[in-house]
Amino acid sequence: MSALTASETVQIQVGNVTVSGPGSKGCYRLTWLNPDGSEGDTTGGRDLDGDIAKAEGIDSWVSSAAGPKAFATLESMMEDCLEQGRSPYDDKKPWKPQNRTQIERHLSRQLRGFETYRGLDVNRELVDKMRAQAGTEVMVKENTIVLRSFLLWGYQAGYLTALQGELLPRACSMPAPSIRRTVVRISEDEGDERARMNGQEETYIRDEDAPSRTLVSALSRTVATYYPLWGELAPELAANSGARWGEQFQLTA
């Protein structure tokens, strides 16, 4: 399309997007109405053909929205999901407190860095980046289970389209973990080498972390000074027995 003179202006409708101008600086302006009623606008360039192509992309993006809720941020979606606190599957059962805590932990980790993205932005590339925020393949699988449920809930709640809600079928491939694990050296009096996640505080101890043999032996000697008959054996017995506590505080060779 030939360039317009300074005195000529156009107003072209490209789907939901209006291309108008050029303005005083020779640039075109693109405006549109979002499904939630808010107005969108952006400044184009000086090439009308290029701005029409840009308008086509915006129109496709806006037209793909599930509805007004599609412009909500992922963070607000998560808050709504946790507030409803129920399974999106057929039984629609309310979550138990411990289930809600686990789901919140998984979602918070996956949304880190993507909180301001909107429902409209959700695609396979984005969800792969979100669920890859883990240090192990097992954690990626756990993230995937929770995120799959979240996407289905988003569709049922009107935030996402049916296609977005089915982005993670049960037979989907798994991305590689994006958070590398590093080995951090702890001083001799604190124990052996342990692995922690990048970005974690050095003082943070997870439930699955086990005390080192050095720590257990030191505790045994301390308890033995007060209870000579059984004090030395007690910490080792506690570290190797019991239900969940026994698993968490087992001896490490």
Image (cartoon, rainbow, N blue to C red):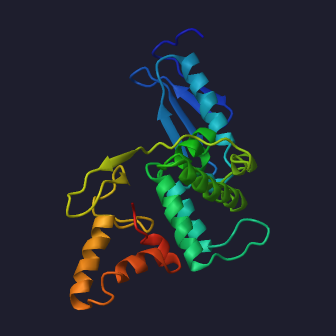
Q: Position of residue 146 (x, y in %)?
A: 61, 59
Residue 3 locus on image (x, y percent): 52, 10
Name the spot of residue 199 as percent of width and height, x first.
33, 52
Residue 177 picture location, percent across and down: 51, 44
Give above or below for 11 relative to 180: above
| Image quarter of residue 176 | top right
Q: Residue at x 40, y 64 (%)?
A: 209
Q: Quadrant of residue 206?
A: bottom left
Q: Is residue 12 left or right of residue 194?
A: right
**Residue that appears at 63% across and 41% down:** 124
Direction top: furthest residue? 2
67 or 97: nearer the eye? 97
Q: Give the residue displayed 55% in from the left and 23% down from the top.
A: 51
Of 251 and 115, nearer the camera is 251
Quarter of the image where the C terminus is located: bottom left
- Nearest the viewer among 72 and 25 is 72
Does any portion of residue 183 appear in the rendered image?
yes
Res. 36 in view: no
116 displayed left or right of 1: left
Seen from the viewer's position, the closer of residues 40 and 89 is 89
Q: Residue at x 74, y 72 (%)?
A: 92
Q: Is residue 142 above or below residue 10?
A: below
